Image: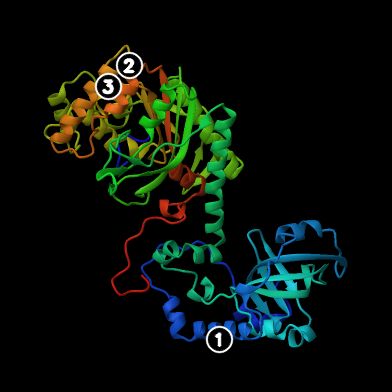
Amino acid sequence: MPSARAGRLESRGPGARFRRNIYRPAKRLAVTNQTSPSPAAADASGERANREAKLQQLRQLGLDPYLAPKFPKSHKNAAVHEQFAHLQAEEKTEESVAVAGRVMAIRNSGMFIDLVDDTVKLQVYTGKEDVQGRFAPVMKALDLGDIIGVRGKVRRTKRGEITVDTDEIVVLAKALEPPPEKWHGLKNVEQRYRHREYDLIGNEESRQTLRTRFRVIQSIRQFLNGEGFLEVETPMLHSIPGGAIAKPFETHHNALDIPLYMRIAPELHLKRLVIGGLSEKVFEINRCFRNEGISPRHNPEFTTMELYQAYADYEDMMAITERTIANAAIVATGSTKVTFGEHEIDFTPPFRRGTMLGLIEEHGKVKLEGLDDAAARDAAKKAGVDIAPTASWGKVVEACFEHFVEPNLIQPTHVVALPKAISPLAKANHANPTIAERFETFCNTWEIANAFSELADPQEQRARFEDQQSQRDGGDDEAHRIDEDFLKAQSAGMMPMGGLGIGIDRIVMLLTNSQTIREVIAFPTLRPRAEGSTEE
């Protein structure tokens, strides 16, 4: 259940004089306005032309990388290091391996190559006679960034480096652009995100961050499968955008000649699956889209996990939120305690709980409970909160919470008892009908989860939809529309149900100490290039 308040990871050796040919991965670089050499600049310098000439030479010799036979790897680099870790200095095995990867350093005129795959670096050695003899055509054409395959026996050098002695070397792809070090590490942040593949080639931290992201997603999926949830799929294109208060992306279906919307949440379709009896526990991990601003914690395309459980309520959702996030933290970092910026965040359950009204009173010294709309607006204005002239009590509470409380919520905190007026899909509290059985989980001042006991009464749901529609008619283009299909589904008899939405991107940011959402999305949304420009 996405937010209803949308907007919402060998030493240089004898070749020291060839140091300029050694590629060294850059650490994560800070955002800067400084521009840096681009592929266009490299082209202008003649480097691309030189690489293209080498490719042509290989083709003329019948060594076209793109027509090379399949090169089956026998080992990843890490497996070579592990399998032959027992070798002593200058000891050699008679077992041959086949490895492949990207050339990231060339030393001693090609005698030593650092080969990198998706695990670790592995040194490759070719004797001087072979460099100048049988492998000369390949060695003369080799550049940093090329993809090669190598077969040979493994030894440990006198300096202690696990090394493959070349018996065969083949170029499998020619890099026509230099690796990022030649661009000074992609200092321009726009280049880093727009050309993510180059960033990944040169930035181990970027690789680890994205690997952590996908391990976290996998861990959530495995955890929920273990809890008996069924993973399902629901539409990305909706005829009515619903399940959250947000502005959608609109498109058009040509064959049906109807407007459609990229989904802002999968909530209503997921509930319909539970109502239909597909499973009492369902979940979906997928993208949602909101046509809103871009910020360090907002991207128009983002990933959520939503789940629904029959015969459960928001208290059950609190427990599963804590367990899901704590498990993800352990998978990502080995601990439920993680460092984010200057803070140590503790995801050990149980999380702190506080009511929205109580937290406003604690942090803002504003008491809103029991006030009517006008009195609530006056109280908020006196406390320095900017309030719309017609804001309802619920909207005032929300504004005061955002103003006074959110900036102070560093440790994981469940904020409970939200106003029903800002929770159109949530069940009202039986003891206080102005309050919803809902919570939002905050950490590092960000909302990271949202859940409630689901409203199951179709008559009450219709009334709330109609209220939302009136707000929409009054100019609120983020308000809910009336979804007749969902109301009909509820009319079949909707069992008591708890629902939960977790923002995957923000969780990964917290677990990887990433200060911007663009670091944890492989290809984030970016501004267009300037007209006529090939680079930023």
What amino acid is labelled 1 in the image?
Answer: Ala
How many numbered circles does the render carry? 3
What amino acid is labelled 2 in the image?
Answer: Asn
Q: Is residue 1 visible?
A: no
Q: Residues within 10 Å of mark 2 (few under 14, many from 20)?
A: some
Mark 2 or mark 3, which has the lower sequence index?
2
Q: Label 1: which residue?
A: 53
Q: Label 3: which residue?
A: 461
CA distance separating discs 3 and 1: 69 Å
Direction from residue 224 to residue 265 in the image, left or right: left
Q: Residue 442, how many percent across, how many down?
A: 40, 35
* Rendered image quadrant of residue 353: top left
In depth, the one of 483 and 519 nearer the eye is: 483
What amino acid is labelled 3 in the image?
Answer: Gln
Q: Label 2: which residue?
A: 429
Mark 3 or mark 1, which has the lower sequence index?
1
